Image (tube, rainbow, N blue to C red):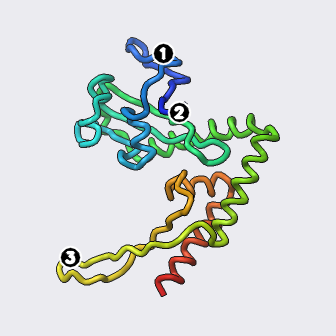
Amino acid sequence: EFVGSSQVLRFVDVAPGLDGPSPGTETPLSGAYCSRVVSGVMPPLIPDTRLEPEAVLLPATQEHHIGAYLGVPLLDAEGTVEGMVCAVSSSPQPELSADDVTTARLIADVIQDVHRRALSSSAASVRRRALRDEVLDLCRGHGRHVVLQPVVELGTGASVAVEALTRFDDTTRNPAQWFATATALGLGHDLELAAAASALEQAG
């Protein structure tokens, strides 16, 4: 669980015969794999940390003897990242694949569903309704804009296309988090279509 600038290990399962952290262990988020996965600096799956430059440079890799890593975010009812479901190995695991990431995401979905059912209090409902209204406003075109980034042919230097990127006025969430929030509220499809329509309109 992410608590302020720290991550707190709430549930820990360690393979028999191995040492591991105990539940309640708290470490800074700044030096963690989790924060880098959430920000997109590191991928959710690293079968061999020796082959991932960012992991090699991270002190936690050596301190905790991390040879392989898998982690997917947990979102709260408002679509904000509140923690991670992670698995680590002290040795590389080259057999890991995208299927394992999918499995971890399914586990995260179940945990999120349990949390959301537990957070059906009136206060949480009010916050969720307010956030839903905010996302609906984004779908209507308020609070977001399109940035066109040229795609350049290296041989000639000519612009051959553009990539349309959606940017949001409210920077408390990055673009990926806004789309994740919309999805968590059942409005992901609406925001994607609205963003695509705005991009086509701006691109002419």
Left-right relation of 75 to 91: right
Left-right relation of 107 to 16: right
Q: Residue at x 40, y 49 (%)?
A: 40
Dot 3 amino acid type: Leu
Which label's residue is closer to the chain start, 2 or 1?
2
Relative to 70, does residue 17 appear above or below in the rendering? above
> In this view, which residue lies farthest toward the right?
122
Relative to 40, does residue 200 appear above or below in the rendering? below
What is the secondary structure assignment of the residue under circle 2? loop
Mark 2 burial class by Cα count in 10 Å: few <14, some 14-19, many 20+: few
Callouts 2 and 3 close, C-beta under 8 Å: no
Relative to 129, does residue 58 appear above or below in the rendering? above
Q: Nearer the viewer, mark 2 or mark 1?
A: 2
Which label's residue is closer to the chain start, 2 or 3?
2
Q: Nearer the viewer, mark 2 or mark 3?
A: 2
Q: Residue at x 33, y 23 (%)?
A: 64
Relative to 24, does residue 197 appear above or below in the rendering? below
According to the image, label 2 marks what residue?
Answer: 4
Dot 1 amino acid type: Ser
Mark number displayed over residue 154: 3
Give the CA distance from mark 2 to mark 1. 20 Å
Q: Residue at x 29, y 24 (%)?
A: 65
According to the image, label 1 marks what residue?
Answer: 22
